[in-house]
Each structure stands twice: as C-alpha cells, then as structure tokens.
Image (cartoon, rainbow, N blue to C red):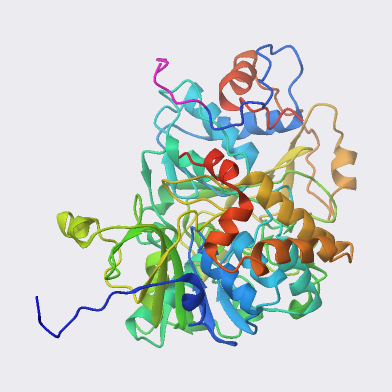
Amino acid sequence: MTSAAQRQQRIIDEAEAAGWIEDGMTIAVGDPAPMAVLRQLIRRGVTGLTVIGSGLALDLLIAAGCVERTMAYYVGGGFGGAVAPSFRRAAESGQIEVWECEEGVLTAGLRAGAQGLPFLPWRGGVGTSLPEVNPDLQLIQDPVKGETLIAVPAIEPDVAILHAATADAYGNVRHHGGPGWLDLFLYRAADRTIVQVEQVVANTDVRADPWATTIAGVDAVVRAPYGAHPFYSRGYYVQDKSFTKAYVDAASRAAFDDDRSALAAWLERYCVEPESHGDYLERVGVKRLISLYEY
Amino acid sequence: MTIEPSDPPAPASPSAPSASLSATEPASRLEIMAAVLANELRDGEILQIGAAMPVPEVAVRLAQFTHGPNIELIFIGARMNAAHLHSLPTPEFGWDHRVVRWAESYSDTGHRFDRLKDWHRRVFFIGGVQVDRHGNTNLIGVGDDHSRLRFRGPGSVGTSTLSTHVGRYYIVLNAHTARTFVERCDYVSAFGWGDGDPEARRRLGLPGGGPKLCVTPLCVMDFTADTKHLRLRSVHPGVTVDDVQANTGFDLIVPDAVPTTPQPTDDELRIIRTRADQRGALRG
C-alpha cells in the first residue's frame, strides 16, 4: 500500500481531548460519566462552562469551579442526601445559574439542536413553573390543533463527551447493551463528540458486526479503561460506593460546614496531581479496581 | 410459585443483615405504606419508579408476588418482573444500575419518551420537596428568588412529563411535615390539580389522569371529587387525626369518621420481609 491517501485515525489522549474544551463553552456529559476527560478539565482549571449533565459527575465539576450554568434535570445526592451538595450550595448562593428543565424538555431541545430546528414542542411541563423560571421555554399555541405546548429552543453543545465500551481507531463506537441515557441525543446535537472507551478494538472487529456500531465516526476516541471510575461502566464495573461517598462527604463539608479542606485535598489528590488517566488509576490502586470488576 | 434455582445472588453487599423471617414484629409505617400501595395496583399494569423511592419499590414487588404476576416494573429504564423469581433486590442507592441484571429490557432516557401514546396505561409514583392541597408537587426548590433559592431541590427529573401522561399516579413521601405540605408550592414541577378545578387538567390538554392518592408515614389521603382537595382517608395505627393536621401546613378535609389504615396481612408482611424487601429498607 503506497497510496498517499491515509484514512485519519482518531485516537487521542485524555489531555488532548480536554484541550478541545475552552472556557465558556457548552459541553454535554454522557452517562456512564467520561471521568478521565472530566478530570483533565478540572486539572486544567477550565471555567465558565455550561454543562448538560446530571448527578455527581456534574457536582464534581461544580465543586472544582468549572461551571457557570447547568442544564440538568436531576442532580441527586445519592447517599441519603436528596440533592448533590456542591450543586445545591452553588445554586443557593447564586454561584451558578440553573437552566431549569426536565428530562422530556431537555430531550426535545437536544432533538431540535440535532435537526437544525429553532425549537421542538413538548407537552410535559405545561401547567408547571418551568416556563416561568426558565424564560427560554415559551408557551405556544400549536397551529394545527390550537393546543398549549412548550416550545423548547434548540440545544447545541460545542462538545459532547461520552464513555462507551469500545471503538476502533476510526471512531466507530459500541455501547455495551445500547447507548447510555441521553448519549445518542447528546452526540446528535453536539458540534463535536469525544468518546472515551474501555477498549480500543480492531476495525476488522467493527466490520464483523457493523449492526452493533452505536455511533459512527465520532471526532475523537480516548483510550480509558476504568475511565468512568468512580462511577459505573455498563458491562464492566460497578460504581465505587465508598470512594464516591468520600467525595460526597468532603463536598458536603465544603458546602454546608464552610470547611473546604477535605474537598480541596480530594480534588488535589484525584483530579489535579495525576497527570494522566494512568496516574489516576495507579493512585486508586489495582486491588480496589479489581473489586469493582463485575456486572 | 416457582423458585428459580438459577437466580443470581442479590447485588446487596454480602455483609448486609439478612431480614428476619419472622413476621411477629409489627409492621413499620413504611411497610404499611407499601402494603397500601400494593393493594392499589392491578394485574397487568405498567409502573414507573424513579430513583430513591424505596416504598414503591417494595410495593410493586409485593403486588407482583401476591396478585399482580403480570405487573411490569420500569425502574428508571430497566423493565423487570419479579413474579416468577423468589425475590428481586431493591436498589441500594440512587441509580444503582446493578438492577439492570434483573431486567428483561432496558430503554434510555430519551427513548423512553418516544412512545407516549399508551401511557394512560401506566402508573407512576412521585415525591416532592413540597406538596400543596391540590396535589401539585415541587422538586425545584424553596424560596422566592429562583436564582438564589433558600433550598435548592434536585430538579424535576422526568416528573413533568410522566405526570402529564400517565393514567394515574401516587404521591409518596418518606416524611410528613408542615414544611412539605404547604398551602401553595413555591414552584410546581408536576401539575396535579392546579387550583382544584376537576377540569383543570383537561383544559390544559394534559391527557393523564392526575394524582390519585397521597401516602405518607402518617396517613393515606385522597382527593375530593368536586374541589380536588386533599382529604384524609385513613391514619396509620398509632397516629391521630390531630397528629396529621399538626404536621400539615393547610387545613385538610377530614371526614366525620377516619378509619385506621389496614395493617398488612401476615402473608403480606412475610412476603415483604422475606422476598420484597430482603434488605430491610422499610424496617427502620
């Protein structure tokens, strides 16, 4: 093969991937959580982000000061707390702006973004406070039946960051057991998509079963086994409960007891000091990782 | 009822205390709530449960074991049926994705809303930071200024959409306080009966049937037909009408006679403790 034309391989490392995200961008964070890339964002000290996300991964970005605005339908606490601590504190103090929404509403906006439409209508939320507390959500009369619906404006993230099972070097992604949560909707709506994977596979594997490809040709693939730790990765490992709880405890002390020392130490130890995903995994330790390796 | 020997072990940690097989201890209030809800459910219904709702989780399992072998449970996106199994573990924390091991199918967030047209056949359970007298609920938060709430709630999850479309739903709270039961919600994330007009949902074009009951650790409430106002239907054993009113931030409608909520039967309690709630989440 001497042809000059070379198909471009798309594997980059987590630090380079994080470099795609600039201060003030809108990013969409999938589930399972793409923690290897998110930790690099924290490490770089990215700020002013609008984040479409949920749960404790979003809470961690807020705790690290990366977030200016959230577009989240649920930021639950996970361990008895109804609300994730950093999100709660930052929203109550006005440090972040909350673009109030709901699962169906957010999905409608992402679909509109993906399809180049100015908005898509949605019924869930009619009669609620959502249009009052989020002026972007307008009540409209539909021209066909005259019904009252919510016009959800298009949502177009600059970058979607996802975590999946496998991909080949050309960005053909497979999710174990189907794409997670909103992942497909985030990918379709975003300008560019980075997918970190448990394993890079051969292109021949992809071609052996093209029907199993869930997203074709993403912009970048990041090699990241255990890349969703401390959260779960479908088909690979379960959430690291005690590790996650240690974060929630530290973040709660920062949020409600005005004592940031434990949170600062946690962020330093797990997000700032490890230069790479490999350094992070070494710090977490093989024994702990193996104990999570079940599905 | 067949017990499948191939059931995988429960994902609960091996150190979790095993529930006592005896049903001699009286039912806890949460167990009473679960039995009330289980008896509301009919065979063949499709139920949606979100994260952190242990009482409905147990209620659905109980109903599947007693009278609803064709009830389908959809926990977040995982569709499960316990009727032909010995037991089905309850989630240990928020979105404990290990329950997917027990699922027969799985649908993700966006896709779950792709087919809403038959959701009148579905039943849903909802919680809230606040609940008002007409069954409107709030997961957004408390405080006048939305940009600086006094208490920031977790967010609406999928409740605005679910409450709009499902055939009926149940408001289920883990605590009954005057802070939760308020005259008027600061924000409404799921429309119940609005200002109490029985036609309110129809006029807004909401196809679902609205909230049917509100079940708390103190009592069971339903809604009056003409004003859709919360009305005391029964108080749990050991609870008085005054207890309920004192912990409710508005005047409840109280009928002349308020019965005591029926206790779970011995059979129900045994099934709860040995099969529906093996982890003892409702034992307190």
Q: Nearer the viewer, residue B49 or A171?
A: A171
Q: Position of residue A91 (x, y in %)?
A: 74, 73
Q: Is residue B203 left or right of residue B20?
A: left
Q: In the displayed structure, would residue A120 be above or below residue A54? A: below
Report the quarter where the C terminus of chain A lies.
top left
- Number of numbered discs overlaid on the protein picture: 0
Report the residue at 40% width, 15% height from top. B2
Q: In the image, B110: left or right of A289? A: left
| Residue A264, percent from left and from top | 78, 66
Q: Is residue A135 above or below residue A251?
A: below
Q: Is residue A40 visible?
A: yes
Q: What kind of secondary structure does the magenta stretch mostly adopt?
A: loop
In the rendered structure, which segment of residues is drawn in magenta?
A: B1-9
Residue A148 appears in the figure: no
Horizontal relation, residue B78 to residue B195: left or right = left
Q: Is residue B151 magenta?
A: no
Tell me the residue at 79%/38% (across/down).
B218
Eyeballing the image, is B38 above or below A275? above
Residue A151, position as x, y percentages in the image: 47, 81
What is the quadrant of residue B79 in the picture? top left
Q: Residue furthest front?
A: A2
Q: Quadrant of the N terminus of chain A?
A: bottom left
Across and down, in percent, residue A95 comes to 75, 80
